């Protein structure tokens, strides 16, 4: 089997239907589609099972979050290449073909991402890959954020991470053991991409390949503490996993600068912002994430609060 699509999903059946319909319109269509149900409380996918009989549905035995759902789908899938796409996207008909052609033409490509445009503003980029660095800051830059799509983002170029939608060579996926399920959520693609790169593969975006994401437009002129994480669940993992990434891949001086200086500046800025906005839920998640991340840097043991989300 040449190519499998893996879709992690939870409680978004209407979005999932739109995605499945867009995948059916791809030219050529994927050989296999696997939907990984992240232990939804009710059987909200029954109608979709009936409407898409060729799709394989896998249900996790308990809530595992994004990384576990992606792994469950990938281990069930049989393709030589695995195309991961989150359930709140609509895929362009040429997207999979372009990613697959890039990967098949160059065996050094371990991950090939696609460009993500806003569903509500179809010509504007949400992100076209991500860059991490400098590592002492653990800063993440979303490539092309809010820019109008154009020639600079319609080529093949290297990135550090490919959020939301990306194709993975199966041999690379198996060599790194899939996604680290302890990461659970944010920073999982960066962690995965770094492990793939350390095997000698490259991580790229094929800028001609595109999807439309149903997430909200980001107003960069009015970013607030709420945008940092969106919810206590997301903010906890965003904060904790930032420390985890630096601890795993930073050099000794980058770890020292981050833990002693820049992480504290980051915490102080957002803590004061949350206090001023009376966002006690976010402040608690921020501090818990920082404490557990620092604990990992010191001890090598990963704590997990499993906040609701």
Image (tube, grey):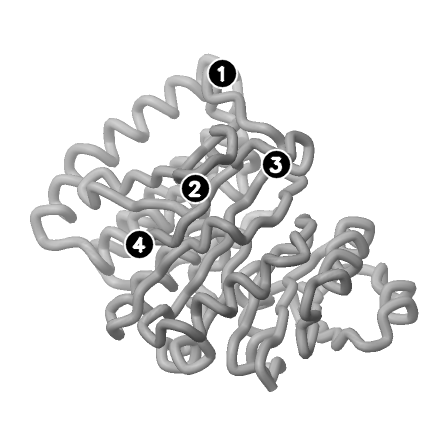
Mark-to-mark CA distance, 2 and 3: 15 Å
Quarter of the view holding residue 289: top left
Which disc number belongs to residue 153? 2
Q: Which residue is mark 4?
A: 244
Q: Are marks 2 and 3 in contact (CB under 8 Å)?
A: no
Mark-to-mark CA distance, 2 and 1: 25 Å
Q: Is residue 61 visible?
A: no
* Residue drawn 90% across the image and 67% down it: 51
Mark-to-mark CA distance, 3 and 1: 18 Å
Which disc number belongs to residue 222? 1
Q: Which residue is mark 3?
A: 118
Label 3's element? strand
Q: Is residue 218 above or below residue 92?
A: above
Q: In this rendering, which labeled residue sits more in front, label 4 or label 2?
A: 2
- For the residue pair 294 and 131, the one nearer the viewer reads as 131
Quarter of the view holding residue 38: bottom right
Mark-to-mark CA distance, 4 and 3: 30 Å
Mark-to-mark CA distance, 1 and 4: 29 Å
Q: In this rendering, which labeled residue sits more in front, label 3 or label 1?
A: 3
- Of the numbered discs 4 and 3, the one sitting upstream in the chain is 3
Q: Are marks 4 and 2 in contact (CB under 8 Å)?
A: no
Instruction: Give how far across and how far down residue 227 sits, in percent.
Output: 51, 29
- Of the numbered discs 3 and 1, the one sitting upstream in the chain is 3
Q: Are marks 4 and 3 in contact (CB under 8 Å)?
A: no
- Of the numbered discs 1 and 4, the one sitting upstream in the chain is 1
Label 2's element? helix
Q: Is residue 171 above or below residue 15?
A: below
Q: Is residue 159 above or below residue 217?
A: below
- Of the numbered discs 2 and 3, the one sitting upstream in the chain is 3
């Amino acid at each position: 089997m040449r190519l499998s699509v893996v879709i992690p999903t939870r409680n978004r059946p209407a979005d999932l239907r739109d995605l499945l319909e867009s995948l059916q319109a791809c030219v050529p269509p994927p050989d296999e589609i696997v939907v990984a149900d992240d232990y939804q409380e009710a059987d909200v996918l029954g109608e979709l099972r009936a409407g898409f009989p060729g799709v394989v549905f896998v249900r996790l035995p308990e809530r595992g979050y994004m990384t576990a759902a992606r792994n469950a789908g990938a281990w069930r899938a049989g393709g030589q290449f695995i195309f991961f796409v989150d359930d709140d996207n609509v895929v362009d008909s040429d997207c999979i073909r372009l990613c697959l052609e890039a990967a098949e033409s160059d065996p050094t490509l371990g991950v090939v991402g696609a460009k993500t445009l806003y569903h509500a503003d179809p010509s504007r980029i949400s992100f076209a890959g991500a860059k991490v660095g400098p590592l002492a800051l653990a800063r993440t830059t979303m490539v092309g954020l809010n820019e109008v799509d154009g020639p600079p983002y319609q080529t093949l170029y290297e990135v550090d991470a490919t959020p939301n939608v990306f194709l993975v060579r199966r041999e690379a996926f198996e060599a790194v053991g899939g996604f680290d399920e302890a990461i659970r959520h944010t920073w999982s693609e960066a962690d995965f991409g770094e492990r793939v790169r350390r095997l000698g593969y490259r991580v790229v975006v094929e800028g001609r390949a595109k999807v439309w994401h149903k997430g909200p437009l980001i107003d960069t002129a009015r970013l607030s503490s709420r945008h940092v994480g969106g919810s206590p669940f997301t903010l906890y993992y965003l904060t904790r996993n930032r420390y985890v990434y630096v601890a795993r891949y930073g050099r000794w001086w980058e770890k020292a600068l981050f833990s002693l200086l820049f992480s504290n500046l980051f915490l102080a800025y957002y803590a004061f912002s949350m206090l001023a906005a009376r966002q006690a839920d976010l402040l608690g998640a921020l501090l818990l994430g920082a404490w557990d991340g620092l604990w990992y840097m010191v001890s090598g043991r990963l704590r997990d609060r499993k906040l609701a989300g």
